[in-house]
Image (cartoon, rainbow, N blue to C red):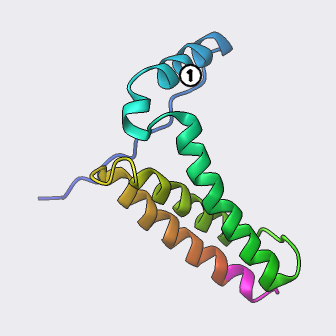
Amino acid sequence: MKKRKKKQSQPKPIVDRSTVLHEAAHAVTSARNVSYGEPIDDFSCTSELWDSYIARITQVRGYPDIRPHDISAMMILLKISRLAQTPGDADHWVDIAGYSAIGAECAAQTECCD
């Protein structure tokens, strides 16, 4: 008996701008605040973490040189910020693992060229 491969979900096609705006309005006005808190609080926490990370990059490299693996690190920091609000949300932990793996791959590909 052959094992079936799980189908990867395909991104929803963009139909038109009205549909995109409607879905965006629903996303930002629904239960999102329950998950992440008020946007100003969520983004303020994330910006503080990113500021610290960018300051450290600047200190180490001599200037704010954002590289591909830094994006992964910064996305991990975004997820860490959201963990403060919803530590039981498995999505954050899964995303952190994914960003970590991608970041390591990016770092390996760019370290050879520095």
Q: Is residue 52 left or right of residue 94?
A: right
> Which residue shows up at 36% across the image and 60% down it?
93
Task: Write down the region rendered in magenta.
Answer: 109-114
The extreme right residue here reads 63
Magenta run includes residue 51: no
Q: Amino acid at mark 1?
A: Ala
State the count of labels.
1
Dividing the picture into quadrants, the one containing residue 57 is bottom right
Height in image: 94 above or below 24?
below
Residue at 50 percent across and 33 percent down: it is: 38
Q: Residue at x 55, y 35 (%)?
A: 39
Position of residue 101 relative to residue 82, above or below, is below
Question: Is disc 1 placed on a helix, strand or loop?
Answer: helix
Crowd around label 1: few <14 · some 14–19 · many ≥20 (10 Å): few
Give whichever of 103, 41 is nearer the camera. Answer: 41
User: What is the quadrant of residue 9 in the picture?
Assistant: top left
Q: Is 15 placed above or below 101 here? A: above
Residue 23 placement (x, y as % from top left): 52, 19
Q: As drawn, is 81 to the left or to the right of 92?
A: right
Q: Position of residue 1 (x, y in %)?
A: 11, 59
For disc 1, the marked residue is 24
